Structures are given as C-alpha cells and as structure tokens.
Amino acid sequence: MKLASILLLVIACAAIAVAVLHFRKSSKPAPGDTPAAAVATSGLAQAADDYMQAWTDLNMFSGVVLLARDGKILFHKAYGKADHSADIANTLDTKFRIGSLTKAFTAMAVLQLEQRGSLSVKSTLSTYVPDYPRGNEITLEMLLNHRSGIVDHTTLPDFLTTRRTNVCPLEETIRTFKHRPWEFSPGTRFKYSSSGYILLGYIIEKVTQKPYAEIVDSQILEPLGMSQTGFEYHQRKPEGMALGYRLENSRVARANDRVMQNAHASGALFSTAHDLYLWDRALYKDKLANKAVLAKILNPPHPEYSYGWAVTRTFDKKVLAHSGETEGFLACIMRFVDDDACLIVLSNFEHCPIGRIVQDLAAILFGQPYDLPEKAVVTQEVISNYDAYVGQYQVSPQLVLSITKEGEKLFCQATGQARLELHPRSPTEFFLREVEASITFIRDSRGRVAQLMLQQGGKNVPAVRQ
C-alpha cells in the first residue's frame, strides 16, 4: 500500500468500493480476534448483531444491515435513530439515500435499451449529443465503465458552493464540465467520474422521451417489486426516509442538506436494504434482461469497474460492489457472485466507518477472523499529553500528518485527506476506528515529542516532527 493512501481507505469508499474492499485482514488471528469456528451458520446472526451493536454503542453506526447467502436472508436488523429530534427509530422499512449505488440501476437501464434496439453501447457520445467536444471518440461503454477521460463534475469548485444546495437542471450540470480539459485520452484508462453517468441519464431521457425516474421505475423497480425505492425530487421527502446525521463537536447533529435530484442518474435514488436484496437476486435471473446482458455484468471486461459495479476480490472471492456517499448517508452493497452471497449496509451517519464494517461483516459471513471495535482508554493522564502531540509530522515530501486537538479529543489529518479522530489505547498509543491503523508518539532524550510511528498492515512508517 502506498504511503499516500495509508489513511485514505476511509474516504475511498465515498467514491467506489474498490480501495476499501481491497483492504485485507491477516489470516492469522490477533489477540482479541473472534475465532472463525465461533461463527458457524447457526451463530452468524448473533455474531453480526454483537458486532453492529458494538459500533452502535460507540455512537458510530445508525442504519440497517442485511446479510444473505444461497437465496436466504441470514441477518437483517435496524439500529439507531431515523429522526433524533422526534425519537423515531430506524426500522427494516426505513428508506436511505444510496448515492452512487444508483449507477448500477442506470447501467441496467442502458443495457435494457440496447437489448430492445433503442441504442448501442458501442455508439459514440456524438450520436446522442452531437455538439459534445470529442464526442466521436467516446462510446457509451466508456461512460458506463469510467474510461471516458471526462472530468468528474463533483470535483469542480461550483459543486461545493452552489450545486449541492441549489436546484441545477440536467443540461446545466452537463455545461459545467462539457468544455473542461480531458483528464486522459478517451478509452485509455480508468478514472471514476460521475459526469459519465450524468450524460447517460441525459441520453436515456433523449432516447425514450421520458424522465429518467420513470424509466428506472417501469423497467426495473416495478418488475422487481422494489416499492420502497425511488428517485428523490427536491422538497419531496419520501415517506419513511431517515434524516442524515454527522458528528459535530462529538455530538450527533443534522448533516448539511443536499439537492439530490441534481445527482440524477449518478446518485439520486433512495432505497431500503430489503429492496436492494431484491435487486441483488434479480441480477442472477433473466427477469430484467437476457442472459447475455447478465453475463456481461457478471463477467466484466475491465479489471476495475464495469456497468455500474466496482470489480474486486475479498477473502480471495470475486466481488461486484459499490458504495455511495452523500451528506449524512453512507451505503454499500457487496455481491459475492460465485458464492451467491450478498452484504448490504445503509447508514444515516456520515461518520460511520463503513469500509471497516463491510469488511468485518464479510468476515462474519465467510467465517474469517475479525475484530470487535476497540474501546478507547480515556483518562486525565492521557488527555494531559495532547498538547505535546499537536504538530506536523512528515512521512515523505508529499505526505504530512497533521495532529490537532479539539476540546478533549485528538485528530490526525494526512495531506489532502479527511480528518480522523485518534482514540487512546495508552498515554502514547492511539488507534483509528475507520481502518486498522495506530499511531505511537515517541519522545527524544530530552522528553520532547520528536516523531510518531504509523502502524498498519504489519508495517511501521516513521514520521518526523517538523
């Protein structure tokens, strides 16, 4: 693992599941690991419940979890609150924003239209958007598989300042990236970009002369009986939808809101865990599309991403997965396609360590070792050292770890990455909940904190204080 990505695992899931799901556990259980033998099929539900309750008790999870295998739901339970101010608990029927999990539905809609002869994924973008720059070089297949080279519009400055909170018509969203420089020549490599799926949504509407939401509903949701899934329009809150939350000064607070309809075909759907399980089951049958289309999804032509699914391996098992992120919500679905197994996590806490949670639930599902979340050891002796740790620690010329203090909490932030809380294990050693990593502060002969040691994956990475 590259140094620059050591602390990035927690936010990689916000884009797609690839980076998070590549993170492996050691095959050798560490002290405190749950033995694989203890998680027999009969005890799987209890193990999963104990694990999720541990995160809930730490105020790090709120949402719904579903585990299934061989066509049977093995575990399905809700945790936390859908609405804290009204004291409404999450239930199995609570709806959650699923963000980029929407992309797989968009891809299916495109493949269905191709099957009907309405379009071809081999056609160029210029076929449907004649004035698009270099549109004759970009195929719909490139858009589907993030190989177009078109810049991701969510990385542009106006996305954070205006387009998250103000209604932006689909054509206007396209104009924000249409004339931006290419990131690479079309078709030459992979780079995740929601812009491609914005264009696909536009093409679906142009070809069918119907709204994207209507096409997804009639072609996918209604045939599968996914009655709790839909397109979120601005100021039309779906009945039974959870509110999104975040941590603010260590307290649960409402997350910033977002106009989800702007995300359109790249992220505007909401759903429930059970509805997403119906979606998983349908991708093994020809109810939505013929066997050739399903084979294309299940046997991806590209190693990173294909037709709305990230391609990876976990515990040496083939996985098609995706994650979604928006203010106050995180979502992830993992499909172990050769094992007929599925794992779904929906959360209305944006600080939930979903990368670690899905990995550990996969371990429970397949009888692999995993750790329960560690409890911090917070004492006045520990807190009294925090001021001495605050500072900048250089790992490499490009990577600096910034240690900051806020109240009685300590945080670590790597260059260009999210700020993560450090939880004390002892007065000098701290761990992160989001990934299995720890930091130890080291004093010199004069008693001054001179460096830290980042420990992850069996490696020790020193960082000298600047």
Image: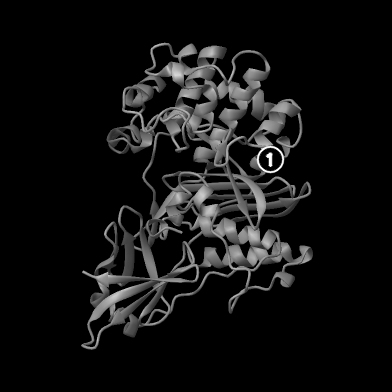
Q: Residue at x 34, y 38 (%)?
A: 155
- How many marks do you count on the picture? 1
Occupied quadrant, residue 135: top left
Q: Secondary structure at mark 1?
A: helix
Q: Residue 121, percent across and down?
A: 58, 21
Q: Amino acid at mark 1?
A: Asp
Against 465, residue 271 (above or below) is above
Binning the other alpha carbons within 10 Å of mark 1 as few (below 14), some (14 to 19) or many (20 upward) gives many
Q: Is residue 94 left or right of residue 404?
A: right
Against 42, residue 263 (above or below) is above
Q: Is residue 76 left or right of residue 385?
A: right
Q: Residue at x 68, y 27 (%)?
A: 222
Q: Residue at x 67, y 62 (%)?
A: 364
Q: Residue 123, percent across and down?
A: 54, 16
On the question of residue 28 being in view, the answer is: yes
Occupied quadrant, residue 102: top right
Q: State the residue position of label 1.
A: 280
Q: Residue 389, percent across and down?
A: 27, 75
On the question of residue 239 being in view, the answer is: no
